Amino acid sequence: MKENEVIWGDALDILGTIAENTADMIYLDPPFCTQEKQRMVSSKNSKEYIFDDTWKDMDDYLYYMKKRLVQCRRVLKETGSIFVHCDRNASHYLKVLMDKIFGISNFQSEIIWSYKRWSNSKKGLLNNHQVILFYSKTSQFKFNRIYTEYSETTNIDQILQERARNKNGKAVYKYNADGEIVIGQSKKGVPLSDVWEIPYLNPKAKERVGYPTQKPILLLEQILRLVTDEGDFIIDPFMGSGTTVVAAKMLNRKYLGIDISPDAVALANKRLESLIKTESFLLKKGKKAYRNLSDSQMDILKHFNAVPVQRNSGIDGFLKEYIDGKPISIKIQKEDETLGDALKKMIKSGASKNCCFMILIRTHIDYQQMFPRKDIPENIIVIDSYEVQNELILEKLHCQYCITKNSQTVG
Ligand SMILES: C[S@@+](CC[C@H](N)C(=O)[O-])C[C@H]1O[C@@H](n2cnc3c(N)ncnc32)[C@H](O)[C@@H]1O
């Protein structure tokens, strides 16, 4: 077996050829026991990738997994760790199996990979997470601490002040003999938790290759950084499109990928030739970076019972109700937009989303550039914001007052 290669074959056979105590880390993303044939057509070359995930029953699946997990344990170094990716179909059974093979005391974490994906098709709760079981081979496992940002609700005392236990064992802030606060050691952030919010690859992601159940490189990078260093050796016995080996190469780790599908091996080799990774805007900039609607704009949308849309110049929201199966968009005129500009943007975006009606909220009156209502298409309704309505009412009252006063003077 050579390092830095991907091999076609059954994980059981290939692992069997590897010497014991060889790998620093094993990540496996095997079939999940979905009882379905997983298939997907890649967008670029229209090739269909398929792998079978159908089993006689759960015992059949667990027997198959057990044989391969036992081999994984054998080839892991004493300082090594294994990550078993699974989901609601069999995670509970696999955990019991892993406890038996690796020992309960070597269970480290049940990592919840959480992401947002929408679907209205199913009755019940939306399934927005998968499970990664993290076991070490021994208690001497390698572990690199990763720190994350403090949450917005963390206050300055929580960050700076040293803590101590009071006589009831409760954590309290520490004070010295003079009653002054004791400043703790410099902090690196909050240790990474077992809930990981990493976006699922969206259909347009650069790194997406059209392989069924392809995982994001960002997820594998986090696992690799946690338990391996540069030069360490990583095995993925169910490699699929090669996400693990690509991440390993990017982070200067040595790797071996195995897959029973020749198509998967060809695809992984191709990905290894030109490393492509999709950066997550969400992770880099945070959720707030997606919000461009102000509180007052959000209030307007709330009054319309509308679903807000961020980062679209022609649509700020959609009414929750459709007409004839078609959506109704709302746009709120921006401060620096004329009514004409706002209308143009709204019509363009609305047409591309097949909107039957569009609502434009006028937020200011542009006395230089009045827009004749007759020029507005019939499927567009322009509504004045409360501010504009106030301004118009006041204007009307002023006029009324002047007329009355003038008529009194003349009289
Ligand atoms: C869930 S996919 C892996 C997806 C991968 N993590 C990715 O990001 O593309 C599971 C893979 O296991 C492979 N597989 C199934 N049984 C196998 C076996 N006995 N040995 C090796 N690979 C196997 C399938 O061909 C499939 O590519």
Image: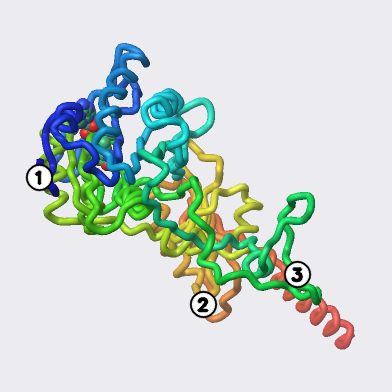
Question: Where residue 82 sits in the image (x, y, percent)?
Answer: 34, 39
> The residue under label 2 is which amino acid type?
Gln
Residue 93: image x %, image y %? 43, 23
Q: Residue at x 56, y 76 (%)?
A: 366
Where disc 3 sits, the SS reads: loop
Q: Amino acid at mark 1?
A: Lys
Quarter of the C terminus within the rendering: bottom right
Residue at label 3? 175
At label 3, the amino acid type is Tyr
Residue contact between numbered discs 3 and 1, judged by CB atoms under 8 Å: no
Which residue in the rendered view is the most extreme toward the bottom? Answer: 409
Determine the image quadrant of residue 214: top left
- Could you tell whether 408 is left or right of 26 in the image? right
Residue 203, placed above or below residue 411: above
Mark 2 = which residue? 369
Q: Nearer the viewer, residue 273 or 315?
A: 273
Tell me which corner region of the image, top left, top right, bottom left or bottom right, holds residue 53. top left
